[in-house]
Amino acid sequence: MIRTRLADLKHLIYAVLALLILVVLGEVGLRIYDSYTGQITRSDIFDQGIVHRSWTTHHALKPSETQQSPTVGETPGVTVRINSLGLRGDEIVVPKPPGVYRIVCLGDERTLATEVPEEETFAGQLEALLQQYTRQRVEVVNAGVPGYCPLLSYLQVKHQLAALQADVFVMNFDMSDVADDYHYRRMTAMSRDGLPLNCTHPKLLPAPNTGASPDCELLLLLQWGKRTASELVADNIGDGEADNISVATGRYAWLKDDPPDWSPYIEQSMEPLQQLKTLTRGLFADLIVAAGPVPWQICPTASGGEALRNEIGVPVGTHCASRRPFQILADYCQQETITMCDTSPAFQASDVPATLFQEETLGYSREGHRLYARELAKRILRNSAGIWERPQSSSHSQPAPQATTHRDPRSTPQ
């Protein structure tokens, strides 16, 4: 009897050890795979290496970090430098030196643009374009953070960027911002007047004792399991649920030619633009709201990666031709007398629109960043008067945007 029990215990121990070995091997294998592909963690911005949780803006870039972005498809990774202020690029002098014209670009991962080198982002190219038109030193700051929307960008300016003494803030409105606002607004503390105060990441707050170890979230095996389960659930979502703003595969549903009624969510997502205008004017800076299209608003074959399309619920070959999202944003900016730069007509006019976007991400390609920068430069030259003049030389590597008659930067957008 005793020998039988010992034999059973022995087999149980062997089984437990074998299971542990399989778990360790699975974890090691996933980490090796993820180090080359980023496929496991790329859906969670807090596992990308350059983002940390924040008490004021939910999350932010880690200061003084330098990392290599992962290779995605055939696109090689690039070096991403984060300065001591948690912004991409060189260190920024504070207070601003005399003779510097400073522009701060706000936005999400398409503004940060870790897929391309710093100088090839639209922020980097905008600096080079505008420098041709002034003897002052132009400095364009890339303040993009993955997952940001106007709500978080407002808090970013309020808590972090006011000291930069920017002359112009450019709020790059992305088509995912409506769903992002819906997500982060629930965590945002508001004043009695309805102004955002702070958005604290929930994992920084005390949580009920669930018995689970916080270290469990560090296991890629668990992340992979959760993601796989979520994908299985998403595959079984009915047609009605595909328009649900809280579902990952429904976050772009408002772009459809026959969209669901997201009026309350759209209105809420744009409220911070008016609040940002008031804040930036108090900082003696101009505000420009810029909008760019997602790939399938321009070309059904752009960003055709099947894994990417499945993740966001937009099948390959989808083309959303409706101008309604851009018109809604333009109408709001006109109502609030905010200058707007709509770059989508320039994207639509391209002879090769698919080349303006990355293949495996929703970001712009090098050519897309170049086009976006040119359109934004035209708007800044038109609206920020006082320092611009004709370019000193026409022998530039790329043609500069045409300067036009200056307007009052506070006037209603055309």
Image (cartoon, grey):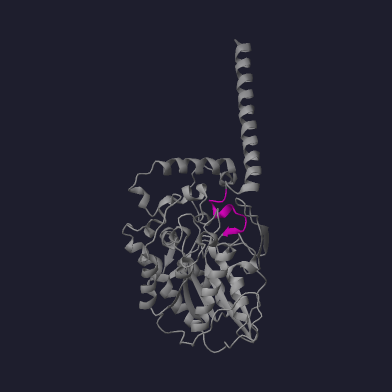
* Vertical placement of residue 342 versus 11, above or below: below
Left or right of 240 on screen, residue 317? right
Give the quarter of the figure containing the C terminus: bottom left
Residue 377 quadrant: bottom right
- Is residue 174 magenta-colored? no
| Residue farthest front in this picture | 351
Residue 31 or residue 77, whichever sits in front = 77
* Residue 367 horizontal/vertical position (percent): 57, 65
Q: Which residues are magenta?
A: 41-52
Q: Residue at x 57, y 69 (%)?
A: 370
Q: Residue at x 50, y 63 (%)?
A: 148
* Residue 44 horizontal/vertical position (percent): 54, 52
* Residue 98 horizontal/vertical position (percent): 64, 86
- Is residue 51 magenta-colored? yes
Residue 363 or residue 162, whichever sits in front = 363
Left or right of 137 on screen, residue 261? left
* Vertical placement of residue 230 versus 89, above or below: above
Instruction: Say how many tags the image has.
Output: 0
* Residue 399 horizontal/vertical position (percent): 60, 77
Residue 101 quadrant: bottom right
Residue 364 or residue 35, whichever sits in front = 364
Residue 94 quadrant: bottom right
Give the quarter of the figure containing the N terminus: top right
Residue 23 visible within the image: yes
